[in-house]
Structures are given as structure tokens and as C-alpha cells.
Amino acid sequence: MHDVTFAELQRIQAAAEDAGAVLQMDEDAFRAFYERTARSVWQYLSRLTGDRHAADDLLQEAYYRFLRADRPYASDAHRKNYLFRIATNLARDRRRRGVALARLPERDDGRALHAGVDENARAAGRIDINRALARMKPRERSLLLLAYAQGASHHEIAESLGLKTASVKALLFRARRRLAALLQNPARSEQKS
């Protein structure tokens, strides 16, 4: 290995600064990022906390902390994962402070999952799923919401929740199995919880 000259060191430092500047967000880039992510983060927080008003507050706090962090990001996906991690931590902190979970929303503002099924049947299904999710552990609920409501990959879930990628598959399997048990026999599952 050869000695690095001062000129080479300056060139390397300038290249590193240029790379960092490319990954930072200006106001327009942030607005575009916000438009792409705000709805999904709000839906996630709303289902996670069970309170639409709390989701509004936590969404604002999540973006505030995201901007305040002023970190370099490898990609837009990395930014989104970091934002979901902030949102998850804020919801967890809220729960730890002793703020009781409110009843989960019965009406979902997202598009219908089952076209052709009458509205009453869809509403009943949402109520059942929301009740089952409300009885699950917060990490189980987070795993399911990120995987199925947000369409996150195992790697993205791991980054968002601070888990190892290898453990997500098993944790997600257990969460699905618990949700299925709650949906199949709600009375029996309530006694076990």
C-alpha cells in the first residue's frame, strides 16, 4: 500500500462530500417523499395505535424526527424504512408511557380488498380483523401491518423494526398463526390472551 498524498486525500474527501450531498434531501425532494409515504405511514400508525388522532400526531412527530436526523441514505427505500422505524418507535414509546390503545378504526379509508363482496360483509370482516389485531402483541401487529398492509419485504421489515432479517420469517409465521387462531375462535383466544 502506498502513502496517500495530501492532494489524494482532498480528492477523496471531496468525493465523499459530493456523495453525501447527493443523498441529502432539499425541500422539493422532501415534498415528493412526503407525498409518496405519508398516507402509508399514517395508515400504519392508525392501525398500530388504534387511534386516528394519535396517528396524526405521531405522523407529524415522525417526519419531524426524520428531518432532524439529517442522515445520509443509500436509497429512497432506505429513507422509507428509516421513517417506518421512527414511526414504530414513537408508537412503542406512546404505549410504554401508559397511553391505552383505543378501539381500532372500523372503517378503512384504503381501497376495498374484495371487489364484488357487499359492503356489510367487508365491514364485518374489517371489524373482526381489527378486533383480532387489537388483541395481538404490538410487535406481531407491526409485523403483519408492514408485511401485508404496506407490502414490505423481510429486509425492509427488519430495518423498520430493528430486527435481524433472518428472524422476520419465523416471527411473521407466528404472527399469522396467532391472527388465524384469533379469527377462527375469538372467544377461546380471548381467554388465552
Image (cartoon, grey):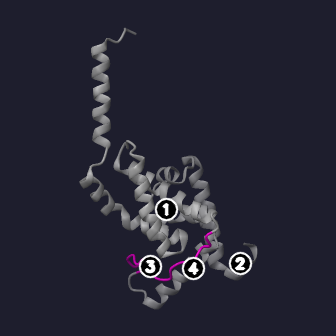
Identity of the amino acid at label 4? Answer: Arg
Which residue matches tag 4? 103
Please say if the residues under marks 2 and 4 sit with CB atoms less than 8 Å apart. no
> Where in the figure is residue 74, as x and y percent of width and height?
37, 42
Q: Nearer the viewer, residue 102 or 146?
A: 102
- Give the prevailing secondary structure in the magenta stretch: loop
Question: Residue farthest to the left?
Answer: 28
Please say if the residues under marks 3 and 4 sit with CB atoms less than 8 Å apart. no
Question: Residue farthest to the top?
Answer: 2
What residue do we see at 53% from left, 68% from top? 48
Which residue matches tag 2? 190
What residue do we see at 50% from left, 49% from top? 159
Q: Earlier in the sequence, mark 3 or mark 4?
A: 4
> Where in the figure is residue 4, as x and y percent of width and height?
35, 12
Question: Nearer the observer, disc 3 or disc 4?
Answer: 4
* Region rendered in magenta: 99-114
Q: Nearer the viewer, residue 88 or 129?
A: 88
Few, some or many residues within 10 Å of mark 3 (<14, 14–19, 20+): few
Quarter of the N terminus within the rendering: top left
Real-space Cα distance between discs 2 and 1?
Answer: 24 Å
Of the numbered discs in the image, which one, if any, rests on residue 108?
A: 3
Secondary structure type for disc 1: helix
Q: Is residue 111 magenta?
A: yes
Identity of the amino acid at label 3? Answer: Asp
Identity of the amino acid at label 1? Answer: Leu
Secondary structure type for disc 3: loop
Identity of the amino acid at label 2? Answer: Glu
